[in-house]
Image: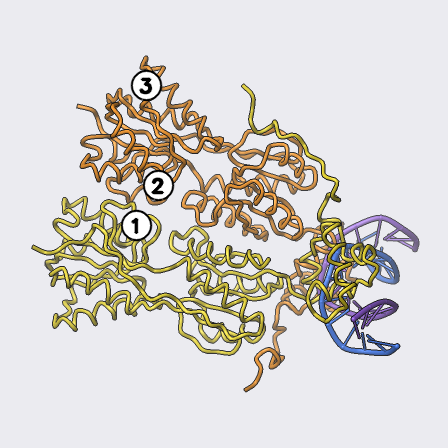
Chain colours: A yellow, B orange, C purple, D blue
Amino acid sequence: MTTKTEGRTRRRSAVPQGEGKVTLEMVAAHAGVSPSTVSRILNGTAVVSEDKRSAVDEAVARLGFVPNPMARGLAGGRTMSIGVVTQAIDSPFYGGALRGIEDELARVGYSPLFVSGHWNAAQESRCFETLRARRVDGIIVLTGRLSDAALVRHAQDLPVVVTGRNLVAPNLCALNFDNFEGARLATQHLLDLGHRDIAHITGDARHPDTQERLRGYRAAMAAAGLPIRPGLVVAGHYTEDSGRLAVERLIDGRETFTAIFAANDQMAFGARLALHRRQMRVPDDVSLVGFDDVASAVYSIPPLSTVHHPVNELGQSAAIAMLQLLAGEVPTAALPAPRFIVRESSRALR
Amino acid sequence: MTTKTEGRTRRRSAVPQGEGKVTLEMVAAHAGVSPSTVSRILNGTAVVSEDKRSAVDEAVARLGFVPNPMARGLAGGRTMSIGVVTQAIDSPFYGGALRGIEDELARVGYSPLFVSGHWNAAQESRCFETLRARRVDGIIVLTGRLSDAALVRHAQDLPVVVTGRNLVAPNLCALNFDNFEGARLATQHLLDLGHRDIAHITGDARHPDTQERLRGYRAAMAAAGLPIRPGLVVAGHYTEDSGRLAVERLIDGRETFTAIFAANDQMAFGARLALHRRQMRVPDDVSLVGFDDVASAVYSIPPLSTVHHPVNELGQSAAIAMLQLLAGEVPTAALPAPRFIVRESSRALR
DNA sequence: CTGAAAGCGCTTACAG
DNA sequence: CTGAAAGCGCTTACAG
């Protein structure tokens, strides 16, 4: 049995190897100009005569020159890297955002530096230190627990874009999804289906989105002339297990309900399991809707009706806004409006 | 309107602020020694007298000195960063590994630099270039599509640890999970339950694990004296949708089956949906088992029986092995043996 | 428009 | 055991 992995013949190229060894000085020598000029051309820092420019371009191509980011950073120029403060690198929700950021940054030669704050302000502060020590050109923060003031302060030193907040400050761009409207849509969907006894599993109270989503739920109920029954609002904290537990409490309590709106998909999945354990069928016995539309929502059983939170676009927009800030432009990024996706976990009350 | 880029007020505080501004030189001055000595103490590069050491330690603490990784890297020392070549930053499977790596590296002050190869050898090569340009101290590769030869070559320049392969080379450590045994276990579980007509959804043929898992399935069947019915082995490529399609083909074909072993959980989820659509109940009508035990497996309906692939430990072990390689030691990392987790998607044939 | 020179903050031979 | 000095590969005032 031959191993497929070994048969790769080692192609040798005429092109100078060892990418890392070619320096800007070598390029300068080959092009017959000074290192300063090469630097300027590479950075578009100054107007340079056409012939020198082409000579340099050619030398760069011939030698396969790749500027050393470390040297660049040390010398005070751009490091071409953007710090990304996420909460957990393996979050099923933020994962899509990380990818959006990575893709968008990649197309202009920037690379992201991911660090995890684990929903902890102290750790997040350390993330910032790490990132600044590495001389990132800017920092993107996905929600986080840092105070707005702290963010504004950092923005004095380098561009920052933050998601999940509304914040206006110089050199800073805040990108927020319309959580209120999304939650209103989800609740309205259930209302339209004829449900009146709609329970809501809230997210972590310290999370900014939580209040907004609760507010959306309340607004829809109120608009329908329905009272908010306190027993129908149960607290979770965005994890599957907290959703499961919330439903257990709901069932064990005296309140009756025919539908549940979970503040995120993960809790909806947990709720689904609790319902399953109690032999309550979705959507036959109770309708269930979530929020976020994570990748696995389509494959849950039954496929989950949920509000689409364009997390990938969120990442892209954040990256684009950062690039604009870096270019001295005013960010124009805007997030798509919430859309409710009807799948199979909700149905008309009969 | 003031331009934000210019207004950089430099705040001055009593406490040495701006962590980034304290340099090794300042520490040296405060401690009354030369920069070289400070550097040596910080790096444990040489034996230093006790009094100088404590003087330096104190100065470091007082000033809150944090070495600049860029300068470190440029000067030829360690950058304290490890490149991690993953396939997709948002993979539900590798996510756990990334986290394991991050956690393990963090405790010794290293930070990971994640880059995505997207299952594409060319992109992976570029990942390596990026990482080397940034002077990472070592590179961890999660499977990938690079040839073994390419990996061995890179290991000549810096320590490499790779998962998902068996490979022996200097300055390189390969960490592989026992896919064969895992698959054998999964199939045996179904066999023990009385199933004979067991279908297998394979993974992407280009993926090294695929053959091993297929081999495990075959071995278990053979050991039970059962023939392998070709029609029962359908190809997928590790995505939910490919699992769904595979089951559609299975159902539309003439073969009968009472159980399915999907080569990973994602395909099992897809299979589950296809079954659901055809009104086939799990586990009543068909038993379903997966492979990997991703985080969401516990919350799928019904909770998925699957082989536990300790992906978090995989990440940790990879990080530990890297640290050992960096210390000039021989890696001792070993992965836990596969365990089959019985949940509710499989049950005895009656 | 374009050089020469200094400097970014460290590490590491080289000499004591 | 410990300095002084050079150098890592760039960028950026400073002078033409």
Dot 2 or dot 3, earlier in sequence: 3
**Coordinates of residue A207 in the picture (x, y in percent):** 35, 65
Kind of residue sitting beneath label 1: Ala
Q: Callout 3: few (<14), some (14-19), or many (20+) C-alpha neighbours within 10 Å?
A: few
Residue A320 seen in this snapshot: yes
**Coordinates of residue B20 in the picture (x, y in percent):** 64, 67
Which quadrant: the C terminus of chain B? top left
Residue B240: image tag = 2
Q: Callout 1: few (<14), some (14-19), or many (20+) C-alpha neighbours within 10 Å?
A: many
Q: What element carries label 3?
A: loop
Chain to which mark 2 belongs: B
Name of the residue lying farthest toward the left: A350
Chain to which mark 3 belongs: B
Residue A282: image tag = none
* Label 1, label 3: how far apart the Cα atoms are: 34 Å
Which residue occupies 67% across, 36% down?
Answer: B153
Residues at discs 2 and 3 in contact (Cβ within 8 Å): no
B196 with respect to B35 (left or right): left
**Coordinates of residue B244 in the picture (x, y in percent):** 31, 38
Residue B8 position by quadrant: bottom right
Q: Are marks 1 and 3 on the same chain?
A: no
Which residue occupies 12% across, 70% down?
Answer: A226
Kind of residue sitting beneath label 2: Glu
Which quadrant: the N terminus of chain B? bottom right
Chain to which mark 1 belongs: A
Residue at mark 3 = B229
B296 with respect to B180 (left or right): left
Q: What element carries label 2?
A: helix
* Label 1, label 2: how far apart the Cα atoms are: 11 Å
Residue at mark 1 = A297
